[in-house]
Amino acid sequence: MVLSKTRMKLYWRLWKNLRVNAGYYFYLLGRRQSTRIRKILKHGRMPTPRSYFPTKLNLRILYDCNLRCKMCGQWGETGAYFAYDTSKRNTLLEIEVIERILNELTPRGLKLIDMEGGETLLYPQFETLLDRMRKQNLYVKFVTNGTLLDHCAGAVVKSGVTSITVSIDGDKDTHNQIRGSNWAYDKTMKGLYALREMKKRLGRNTPLVQIAFTMNRHNGAMALRNLCRDLRGKELADVLEIKLSPIFIPEQAEQAYINLVKKYFDVDKGVLSPGGFRDDYSDFVEEGYRIVKVVSALKKEAFDFLLEPLPHIPLHQIPRLYADYSWDLGRGPCPVPFDEPTIDADGNVYPCNLFTDAPLSMGNVYETPFLEIWHGSNFMKFRGMLMDQGGLLPICNRCCQLTEY
Ligand code: SF4
Ligand code: SF4
């Protein structure tokens, strides 16, 4: 097989990034394939209490966002954050509290911090935050809509951040329509150009730049093809992740989850976040076949970025991914509540990062040391509830934590 010049340049770029971040990729591989926790859970057993600590920490550093994307579970058409009052919407997870948690967890094996929002780059002390985390020798990644990236590209590159994910949902018209703004696409592209130039100027091979395209009913297969063509030859991204299915939860599954948490936690009000993802894609089969065709064709083209369809399933199964919510891809049991907690901007701790409703908080880091919460009775009850259901909850089947593992 003869590699095209484009491919050779891409692989060389990725190789240079891999050399700098080899430890990070080893960590990711280990998590996917052979974690001790995953093996224990697969045997239907619970790991010994107090024998496990987080290796990855999700931090929702703020709730606020400068966009209102249609499909967003937080600020979209069915978004859960609209129910928050102004003071909660403006809350920031304080740097001092984050540092205290890192001091607890880094000696116990924490490796990776994953930051999200809202829009992460709206966090006023974002550069300081990156510096403090990198000083603890942690791998750091964050997700952004990219619209503010041009202002801070230099700081991001200099900080040595490991990876950044920029979400783009199609060509300019489609993306702007989904994002609810006529400037979003151009601003995001400007940010990507700034990042590319800064990496070149400083001679850096990090961060790895990933673009996340989420296939949903507002864009579709042709928007993906057009985006690939728009990006081609510009060296703006290292990887284009094609999230083949959005996170969605049919109403029945949402209700089953609400009944379940009522039974285990006696909570019947304020469980709003699953409703933020309420949708049903059983009507998407025809588009599913179109997606198979387009993705198969794109995979044969030589782009200057890697195409990574997620989840890793044979492409012919894509229509089923949308139409059959009961299909769990054989991915359970979910190890996330044993390995990857989420801390929300208000300090509440949750077992997973999509379903963050205050009545189901496991505890609050402004009041209690993190490890007390981690080993505490609420967390143990949640893990027990999960395992009683066979390792997956009714709302789990299209959760990205599960499908992208
Ligand atoms: S940019 Fe992200 S957080 Fe903001 S509205 Fe869009 S999807 Fe939601
Ligand atoms: S798969 Fe389920 S338990 Fe695991 S992170 Fe997602 S919602 Fe949480």
Image (spheres, grey):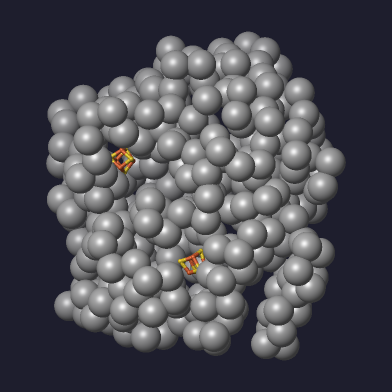
Residue located at (71% from left, 84% from top): 45
Where's residue 341, x and y in %? Answer: 59, 53
Quadrant hosting residue 145:
top left
- 127 vs 273, nearest the viewer: 273
Give the vertical position of 219 relative to 274 (above or below): above
Q: Quadrant of ligand 1?
A: top left
Quarter of the image for residue 15 reads top right
Which is nearer the eye, 116 or 156?
116
Residue depicted at 32% across the width and 84% down the height: 324
Q: Position of residue 21 (x, y in %)?
A: 76, 39
Indicate left or right for 392 with 55 as reference.
left
Which residue is at the front of the view, 228 or 211? 211
Left or right: where 61 falls relative to 167: right
Q: Is residue 397 left or right of residue 288?
A: right
Q: Determine the residue positioned at 53% across, 50% down.
A: 363
Residue 142 in sight in this render: no
Q: Position of residue 35 (x, y in %)?
A: 76, 67
